[in-house]
Image: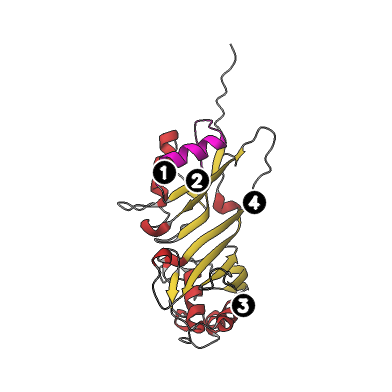
């Protein structure tokens, strides 16, 4: 009689998108609707053995994602296509699994991260637009793009970003590297929409929202130019502007160091 193969299946790495408006964030919180909780319920409908999920980013309440990376360790050998289709059939409309692939058992997205790209969307309009209410921060013109761009240019590189975080962030190491921070020009078909894009190796709590709020405050003339440079030098949160609201922020891309798929490995689509 052939010996039974007791080797557990590989980990599964999911690419997850969600509208964060109705969630209290990604991470689990007792008594709150979270992306983690909704996704884990769907995963357990396919494989009840799954004990936990491992996400690449703990997005806050109201923050959206186009490309969150989430790993899990199943007991069942379900192909990647099966995970995508099965989970999407079980998930609510504000969450979707956009892709799946195998990864080494115990794969940890945070440990294999190469960087993240966030996009903060601004609506330059004097009147509220209900079609964009959940996805953009509306600010009234005028808005000086060049001044805002200069604030963002000052933070590119490796710096101590201790001023760019909430008081509740306990991390001791506050040095981060930003490879890009810029204003994305509005599309020709929608001149009201402007985006701030920030890419880096890692981020502190509310760091992107503080960057966006400060750049916008300078662009609107509410904060003296050079605020971000002053804050890098002083380490003082008081040198910066407001924390932008969550609803305009999107986790746009998570870049990971992934093992090469070998023969028989599985990814979909």
Residue furthest top in the image: 1
Residue closer to the observer: 20 or 239: 20
The magenta stretch spans residue 163: no
Nearer-N-terminus badge (4/2): 2
Nearer the viewer's eye, disc 3 or disc 4? 3
| Residue 112 versus residue 127 in the image, above or below | above
Q: Which mark is residue 97?
A: 2
Q: Give x and y (percent) for residue 244.
A: 44, 72
The secondary structure type at the circle numbered 3 is helix
Q: What color scheme is it?
A: secondary structure
Residue 121 percent across, percent down from the top left: 50, 68
- Identify the element where label 1 is drawn: loop
Bin the neighbour count of mark 4 within 10 Å (Cα to Cα): few under 14, some 14-19, many 20 and up. few
**Part of the protein shown in magenta:** 70-92
Disc marking residue 91: 1
The residue that label 3 is drawn on is 153
Nearer-N-terminus badge (3/4)? 3
Q: Tell me the CA gap for discs 4 and 2.
A: 20 Å
In the rendered structure, which disc, 1 or 3, sits on the residue that comes first in sequence?
A: 1
Answer yes or no: do the residues labelled 3 and 4 have beta carbons within 8 Å?
Answer: no
């Amino acid at each position: 009689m052939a010996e039974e193969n007791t080797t557990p299946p590989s980990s599964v790495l999911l690419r997850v998108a969600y509208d964060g408006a109705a969630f209290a964030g990604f991470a689990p919180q007792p008594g709150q609707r979270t992306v983690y909780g909704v996704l884990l319920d769907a995963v357990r409908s396919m494989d009840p053995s799954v004990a936990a999920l491992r996400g690449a980013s703990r997005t806050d309440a109201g923050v959206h994602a186009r490309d969150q990376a989430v790993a899990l360790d199943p007991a069942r050998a379900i192909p990647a296509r099966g995970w995508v289709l099965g989970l999407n059939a079980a998930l609510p409309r504000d969450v979707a699994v956009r892709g799946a692939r195998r990864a080494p058992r115990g794969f940890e997205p945070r440990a294999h991260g190469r960087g993240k790209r966030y996009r903060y969307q601004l609506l330059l309009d004097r009147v509220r637009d209900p079609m964009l209410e959940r996805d953009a921060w509306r600010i009234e013109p005028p808005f000086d793009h060049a001044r805002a761009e200069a604030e963002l240019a000052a933070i590119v590189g490796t710096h101590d970003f201790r001023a760019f975080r909430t008081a509740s962030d306990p991390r001791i190491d506050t040095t981060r590297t930003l490879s890009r921070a810029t204003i994305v020009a509005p599309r020709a078909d929608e001149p009201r929409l402007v985006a701030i894009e920030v890419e880096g190796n890692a981020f502190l709590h509310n760091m992107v929202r503080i960057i966006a709020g400060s750049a916008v405050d300078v662009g609107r003339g509410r904060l003296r130019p050079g605020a971000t440079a002053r804050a890098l030098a002083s380490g003082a949160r008081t040198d910066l502007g407001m924390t932008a609201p969550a609803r305009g922020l999107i986790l746009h891309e998570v870049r990971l160091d992934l093992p090469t798929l070998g023969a028989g490995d599985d990814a979909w689509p």
